[in-house]
Amino acid sequence: MAYPEMPERCDYGLLKSEFGSIFQPRRKCIISVDLDGLLSAVLMGHLLGWEVVGTYDASSLHVVRGCLPAGNIGTEKALAQSKLVFLDHDIYRQEIDSIGHHLLMWSEDISVPLHTEGRHSLNPNLLRRIAYNKAFNRKYPFSTFHFLLACASAWGTLGDFHPDDEITTLLLHIDSSFVNAINYQSNALDWLDWLGGSEEKSPLYPICRRMLRFTPRTILEQFRNLDQRLSGFGMATRPSAALVRPDNEQAASAVKNFLDWLEQETGWRANLAIRGDSNIATYTLKRRSAKPLRSEFEPAIASEPFSYAILNRGEGGLNYGWLEER
């Protein structure tokens, strides 16, 4: 079954009917280790009671042992049987659900069937058929969190959402979304229109409206204040910094401080079951990177990596890898 195509505007009704099996309550999820992964977990914890039981990054996978089936059945099979969903990741497996936002297509004529056949891989770039060879500058410029926020609003599950200046600045900070919007204004506006962010009922509208009255000085002051806030919690301030580290008590404490503040401001809170103790199973990844040429992409996809992404046009712009079995 072909991946649904929505070139003009996101059809949230079609999206829900096609990918509704992913959005089930009380699921256990594995998140990215940065701010986008953490805030996506906060949102899904608030909306559907999802519980964070693992983290995944470029070098390792950490999962609470109790979430995996007993016996030596292989890592990927265990993940599939556990019905875990990867949040802010794109997993190249039909048996494993994932929600991400990286660029995954090199061209229309090179198929990526483990993403496009079936309904286990939800990604806005795939929904719009954005491909590297013809439309790299049109790739999705925001975060997984923003995409989920728009979906939740369209489906009527979000409720009232009126972020103040500080929370707005935090949401603009995720995955350098504000910087991307400034650097690629036409693309950002195009995606806002596609998401419905210009409509008053969209949860992105209050953010866009507040941006209209933010002067350059206000923007600088707000980001300075956010930097001080995050630093005060003991968190790294870069959007892509590794924040969720189950084997690092200092990082875990900083995240707790941040989540306590966020809950006070929004009423939302992530349900973090992952802790830095012996109940965590750790798996390493065999990673590869290359310049995203067709001659590199085709054999990489043919080798069926566990995950991959086209990050940029540089020498290491194509990143992919496999979980190593224990």
Image (cartoon, rainbow, N blue to C red):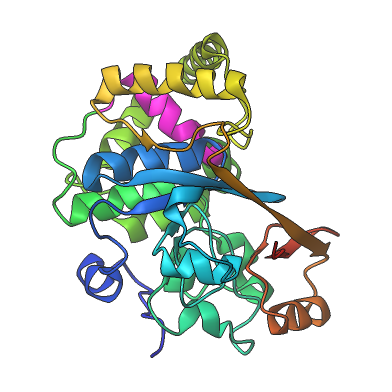
Q: Quadrant of the C terminus?
A: bottom right
Q: Is residue 109 above or below residue 254?
A: below
Q: Toward which corner of the image does residue 133 lie, by quadrant?
A: bottom right
9 vs 256, nearest the viewer = 256
In percent of the image, x 50 and y 46: which residue is there?
54
Magenta stretch, main secondary structure class = helix
Residue 197 appears in the picture as rendered:
no
Q: In the rendered view of the protein, which quadrant contains the N terminus?
A: bottom left
Residue 114 position within the rendered picture, expressed as x and y whole percent measured from the top left: 53, 80
- Look at the picture and state if 246 lies above or below 88: above
Q: Residue at x 16, y 49 (%)?
A: 157
Name the foreground residue: 232 vs 128. Answer: 232
Q: Nearer the viewer, residue 37 or 244?
A: 244
Could you say which quadrant of the image residue 243 lies in?
A: top right
Q: Which residues are magenta?
A: 163-177
Look at 39% across and 23% down and name the residue there. Answer: 259
- Whether residue 170 is in magenta: the answer is yes
Q: Is residue 278 left or right of residue 157?
A: right
Report the residue that reaches farthest toward the front. Answer: 71
Residue 304: x and y, percent?
66, 78
Q: Observer-nearest residue: 233 or 52?
A: 52
